[in-house]
Image (tube, helix red, strand yellow):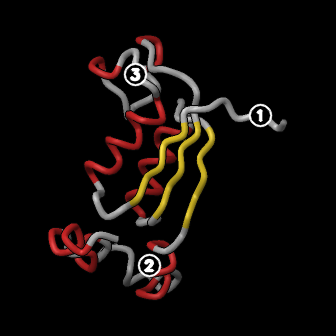
Amino acid sequence: MDQKVLRMINIDELYSRQTPLNFIGIDGQKKLLNSQVLIIGAGGLGCPLLQYLASSGVGHITIIDHDHIELSNLHRQILFSMDDIGKPKAEVAATKIMAQYPHIEVTPIIHRFDTK
């Protein structure tokens, strides 16, 4: 994690509402910040999932999605806006998550996930 970014953000304050919870605590928050999650699809379920994982403090999120944002996505894919139409979902989602949570690493992969 970039030390410059850490100086801008008071991590303790950012997560101060969840660290007092017995099932999270300081140690649990550190585990979240050191964890990695893979999200396949930045659509109707992936968008809010990305936002909640980032806001809870998951330290590295990888997004795989081959699709581009369409007008018909906007009413249910709440991370995207009109300005994003035509752009790759994975890249836009990563950019928006990192803008709000610059201490989190987000890796977009524009690729169709399959089992082959």
What amino acid is at disc 3? Lys
Residue at x 44%, y 81% (from the top left corner):
30
Which numbered mark, 2 or 3, is in the foreground of this view?
Answer: 3
Mark 2 or mark 3: which comes first in sequence?
2
Q: What residue would you read off at disc 1?
A: 114
Residue 106 in picture, x, y percent from top left: 43, 52
Task: Give the Cα distance between marks 2 and 3.
Answer: 33 Å
Residue at x 60%, y 52% (from the top left corner):
38
What amino acid is at disc 1? Asp
Residue 31 in picture, x, y percent from top left: 51, 79
Is disc 2 in contact with disc 3, using a CB cutoff of under 8 Å?
A: no
From this view, report whether residue 9 is shown above or below residue 109.
Answer: below
Mark 1 or mark 2: which comes first in sequence?
2
For the N terminus, the image quarter is bottom left
Q: What residue would you read off at disc 3?
A: 87
Q: For this view, does 60 lie left or right of residue 115?
A: left
| Residue nearest the viewer, comparing 28 with 3 | 3
Q: How many marks?
A: 3
**Residue neighbourhood size for the residue with mark 1, other residues' Cα within 10 Å, grouped as few (<14), some (14–19), many (≥20):** few
**Residue neighbourhood size for the residue with mark 2, other residues' Cα within 10 Å, grouped as few (<14), some (14–19), many (≥20):** many
From this view, report whether residue 86 is shown above or below residue 59.
Answer: above
Q: What residue would you read off at disc 2?
A: 29
Mark 1 or mark 3: which comes first in sequence?
3
